[in-house]
Amino acid sequence: MLSRLRAIKQSLSAFALTTTTTANRPVSSAARAMSDDSGNGAFANPIKMDTTRSDCTYDQTENIATFAAGCFWGVEHIFNKYFPDLKTTVGYSNGKETITNPSYRQVCSGATEFAEAVRIEFDPAKTTYAQLVEHFYRTHDPTTTNRQGNDIGTQYRSGIYTHTPDQEKIAKEVTERVQKEHFTSKGLTITTEIIPAGTWYDAEEYHQKYLDNNPDGYQCPTHTLHW
């Protein structure tokens, strides 16, 4: 978590934002680590909404996949590493409908119920939805609730957010198979939520393709091929 905090601060510095350090900071989530008890941390003041960001619900389509698997930097990176033809965007999905255009700070607080997620546009002639779901399971730990590695909070939950009934069917079929082949014998149970995709918001620009732009940036250790 501290590594991710340092990486975030470096990115924000590039965007001419001021960061500060304080003592006795809890580090169980990025949001808490960025602000001290007095509210005078790096994000003490609310971040103004970026009007260039998406603030609409995407059309339901079979050529879009949405996954949550912890810190979206690593999730996006490992999808693009093995499927370079994908078009990916990181953002916030399936949170409270009463909250619009949430900031990263708000999502990290856990109060919005949004998950850090990756939205994927794919060509089914090149990559099937089932292949994407399989890769999703191969590259994170789907058996830990609201956690990936040291990243803890509802924003880091494991989720498959489906865009069509067929996607839901495929996601559940792949999940059942992966459970039997890779987790049952270990006494582990997949806790991934499989629900319809909710409202989506693009994350701030500095999060997009973060690890491509910052090769030494933080990556959750669970974001690797597990089989």
Image: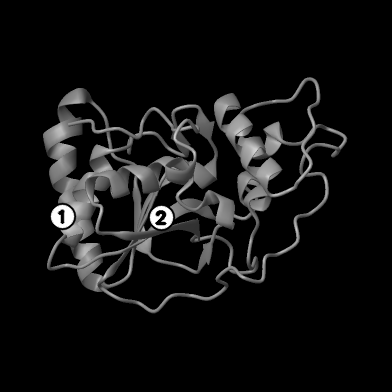
- Name, please, the residue furthest toward the bottom: 59
Mark 1: secondary structure: helix
Residue at image position (75%, 61%) is 48
Residue 65: name its quadrant.
bottom left
Q: Is 162 left or right of 102, judged from the image as shown?
A: left
Q: Quadrant of the N terminus?
A: top right
Q: Residues within 10 Å of mark 2 (few under 14, many from 20)?
A: many
Q: Position of residue 110 (x, y in %)?
A: 62, 46
Amino acid type of disc 1? Glu
Q: Is 39 left or right of 177, judged from the image as shown?
A: right
Residue 35: name its quadrant.
top right
Q: Position of residue 97 (x, y in %)?
A: 58, 69
Return the residue at label 2: 118
Return the residue at label 1: 173
Q: Of the residues under marks 2 and 1, which one precedes in the sequence?
A: 2
Q: Is residue 5 above or below residue 137?
A: above
Residue at image position (32%, 39%) is 142
Q: Residues within 10 Å of mark 1 (few under 14, many from 20)?
A: some
Please state which of the two labelled residues, at mark 2 or mark 1, is closer to the viewer.
2
Q: Position of residue 127 (x, y in %)?
A: 16, 60
